[in-house]
Amino acid sequence: MNLDLVSHNNKNIQTLKIFRFFLYSWVLIFYNTLGLNVEFFWGKNNFIPKITSHIFFGNSVINLFEYSFISNHPFFLIVLLDIFIIYNLIKLQNRFCPIIIYFLVVTLDARAYYILDGGNNLISLLLIYNIFFRISSDKKGGLSKFDSSLSNLSLLMSKIQICIVYFVAGHMKLNGNYWPNGTALYYTLSVSEISLSAARDFVKFINPIFLVLGAYSLLAYQLSFPWLVWFKQTRKYVLRIGIVFHLGIAFIMGLTFFGYALCVAYFVFYDEEEAREFIYRFGAINKKFKNLFEKANARLAIYSRKF
Amino acid sequence: MGNFKNKIGHLISLLSISLAVVIFLNHLICTLLYLAPKNPTSRLYREYVSRYMFPLFTQRWLLFAPEPQTSQIKFIYRCEIRGNWTEWKDPTYELIQRHQKNRLSYYGKEVYVFNAVARDLTDAQIIIRSSSDLETNKDIANAKRLFSTICLRDFSESSRFQFSVISLDAKNYSERMKAGFYGKMIKMDYPAIKI
């Protein structure tokens, strides 16, 4: 566990890089996907009532939807968000982009509050911590002690925040009715209309032992996550199980963006070495694709010459 | 002189780091108190904590805890075309089918909007006592606008529409083998409305 909070050189650069990349990828995918039907979610005549006292900013001056240009052209905000995200991914050191990105996300969320879930909530919290991340470029030398400690503390707080989410979820489930009696998975999968219909049948016909075992495993996972994720020996298993679990939520329960948001959050737990390895592997896959593409291009060129 | 400058620099960085640590600890303690079950400490600092946490750090862990959803609220509607009523339809049916086919789409979130509009009506327990209720209530006005748009989209000659809010309870686990997905159903009809 790296708790070196006051080093001049930020020792978490690779971790911050991949975390920011995946955090922004969630934002890009979410808002651009919903942007395909922008009028329904953010349009002037949509079916989400306007709230007079803004959820996030009581002051209407900074609620951009109060301005007629924005309420008539909400797609402009998504384009603006895309531009700032791409710019910030290129210029990782920029300190103002994360603030603007957070502000744009909160503004869009406040107008379409019907569609928000726990995933949006977690992403907006992580975007706040992202404001304080400092990714120094090697050319400009290290960071000031204040910047470095602020960045490290924000990263630590992001980790604690995710642990809190799991602990609160596990604790509340334990004190509920359906999780301790083992029937929670049946209700979760059979009531939600966006779950796969095969999953609905599955929980109906499956032996109750597996249903109880599933519910208890999930409880055990949520309650042990906040402890086991801090140790290198157990962390990789905890995160792998979590990724499988959340991809299951995404595709079986149909809560795609929620599942992806939790997978994104896991990147804060990567240490520098793991992050570097991840980037290396990602680069290797990228190279393979490039080679394949070049080969395919060359073959196409040969064929086109033949004909 | 150089030594003095160094000392001042060291002091400033120490102070700024201490400030960052204090801010961090304050945030951490407030988050913990905000999310912890009611206890003497959270009661004592409730006002400060809620002032600090709202609105930026509000945390609503709807999908994480504590109980699974055991009921569902949704709309059904029908439109009148030249004096004949269509069948009752679920406005989210097609959206759900599309979402099942493509998980990376916006259809699932559209379903959220329909269900939220229906939930607003039941949360407020709006019961139509007089015709003026239909005119004045904001939630009903929103639902009216929603279904007049849908009816006109589907049938340009629609003259009236009607919607109902239905609350569907999950079947108890012990009754899971009985036919149908849902157990108890409560239906709340709203009068037919002119477009």
Image: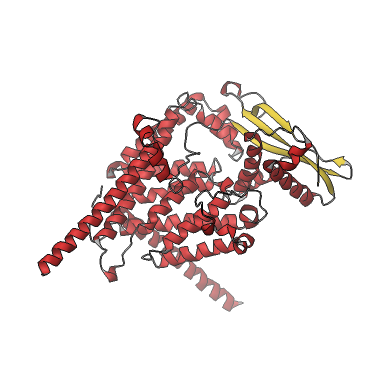
- Residue sticking out furthest to the bottom: A305
Question: In x, y percent, where is residue B106?
Answer: 60, 51
- The part of the image, by quadrant, that contains residue B181 is top right
Q: How many numbered discs, if any?
A: 0
Question: In x, y percent, where is residue A14?
Answer: 33, 59
Q: Is residue A142 left or right of residue B99?
A: left
The answer to whether residue A104 is above or below residue B144 is: below
Q: Is residue B114 left or right of residue A186?
A: right
Q: Is residue A306 among the parts visible in the rendering?
A: yes
| Foreground pick, A146 / A31 | A146
Question: In x, y percent, where is residue B75?
Answer: 69, 38
- Residue sticking out furthest to the top: B174
Q: Residue at x 42, y 60 (%)?
A: A98
| Foreground pick, A240 / B151 | B151
Question: In x, y percent, where is residue B157?
Answer: 85, 50
- The part of the image, by quadrant, that contains residue B173 is top right
Q: Quadrant of the N terminus of chain B?
A: bottom left
The answer to whether residue A86 is above or below residue A197 is: below
Q: Residue at x 63, y 45 (%)?
A: B113
Tell me how the rendering is colored.
secondary structure
Q: Is residue B92 among the parts visible in the rendering?
A: no
Q: Residue at x 55, y 64 (%)?
A: A79
Q: Residue at x 39, y 57 (%)?
A: A131
